[in-house]
Amino acid sequence: MAIDLTKIDYFTEEGSVDTVNSRTSADTDARMAEVWSALVKHLHAFAKEVDLKQGEWEAGIDFLTRTGQMCDENRQEFILLSDVAGLSMLTDAINNRELVGATESTVLGPFHVAGAPELPMGSNISLDGKGDSCLFDGRVVDRDGNPIEGARLDVWCDNADGYYDVQQPDIQPKWNNRGIFTTGADGKYSFKGAKPVSYPIPYDGPVGQLLKKLGRHPNRPAHMHYILSAPGYKTLCTHTFVDDDVYLKSDAVFGVKASLVAHFEKTPDGETDWHSPFDFVMVPA
Ligand code: BEZ
Ligand code: FE
């Protein structure tokens, strides 16, 4: 028997979303089907809204191809793309909605390295000794202000030249400006390090070209990175930002939150040039 061609759901501009989504098999994982169908819906709406030209589609495919080709074990250009598009911070916001009272989270970024040295409280993590020195200290507490014992603070920042150690493996000492500190019963932490400086995210690839086309700078305001973990508590990935930085209002990856801007005070008579106190509040897992 001949196929009734009038009954086939051929692709049309008007019916594009339904045509594509109706192909998804009924036994596809429900969440997969939900996410895919929403992605198709919004992608098609985007193409229709901007009246996407063939050459623009080709340029977009070329951009994504180059973004993927830039990725290796040391460089994650797709995360960078997500960061500059605000998608990383949006995902972070969606996933931390109900953490009332906790220190706010922000982006992880590409420069965290697992396995940094475990150091005694008060240690200096600046191994190249460059730049202004700073004492970072405070307490890790729960929402009632009780100290959290056994909280691990995994910290990292750039050096005074604006580079992470992993960006300059032949120049900086391994583990420069990195360390892990574990609180005792008083919940207190303290370590010394370089006062962070602002720096550009890697902009020698497709994401840098995109920023240039958009008239955007690639800089992040100076910050210290933290991942705090403690038994029974939700792991917190955050930064503290230097309060006088010119890029606080225009972070290339939208990571700044007012509550994370830390006070940095000059300490001319201190052991370090600066002191930045900051308390972290963790919530139960
Ligand atoms: C960072 O802070 O290390 C970072 C975050 C997002 C993109 C690039 C760098
Ligand atoms: Fe950073």
Image (cartoon, rainbow, N blue to C red):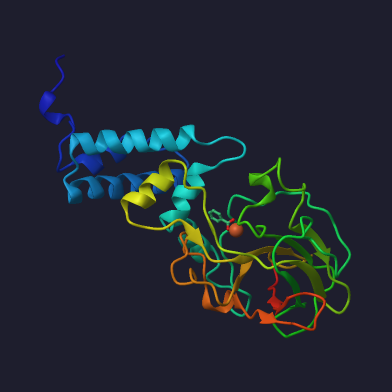
Report if residue 58 is visible in the image: yes
Report if residue 27 is visible in the image: no
Please state if 5 lies on the left or on the right of 132 as rendered.
left
Please state if 170 lies on the left or on the right of 149 as rendered.
left
Picture quadrant of residue 262: bottom right
- The residue under the point 62% across, 36% down is 73
Q: Nearer the viewer, residue 5 or 189?
A: 189
Question: Please, is residue 250 above or below residue 80 in the view?
Answer: below
- The residue under the point 77% across, 48% down is 173
Q: Total label count?
A: 0
Q: Nearer the viewer, residue 202 or 80?
A: 202
- In the rendered image, the quadrant that contains the C terminus is bottom right
- The residue under the point 52% across, 53% down is 201
- In the rendered image, the quadrant that contains the N terminus is top left
Question: Please, is residue 145 above or below residue 260 in the view?
Answer: below
User: Which residue ends up furthest to the top in the rendered image?
Assistant: 1
Image quarter where ligand 1 lies: bottom right
Where residue 34 sits: x, y (%)? Answer: 40, 48
Picture quadrant of residue 125: bottom right
- The residue under the point 49% across, 43% down is 77
Question: Please, is residue 219 above or below residue 3 in the view?
Answer: below
Q: Nearer the viewer, residue 202 or 226?
A: 202
Where residue 273 sits: x, y (%)? Answer: 74, 75
User: Which residue ends up furthest to the left in the rendered image?
Assistant: 6
Please state if 56 lies on the left or on the right of 121 as rendered.
left
Where residue 35 sits: x, y (%)? Answer: 41, 48
Please state if 18 lies on the left or on the right of 84 as rendered.
left
Where residue 264 sits: x, y (%)? Answer: 65, 79
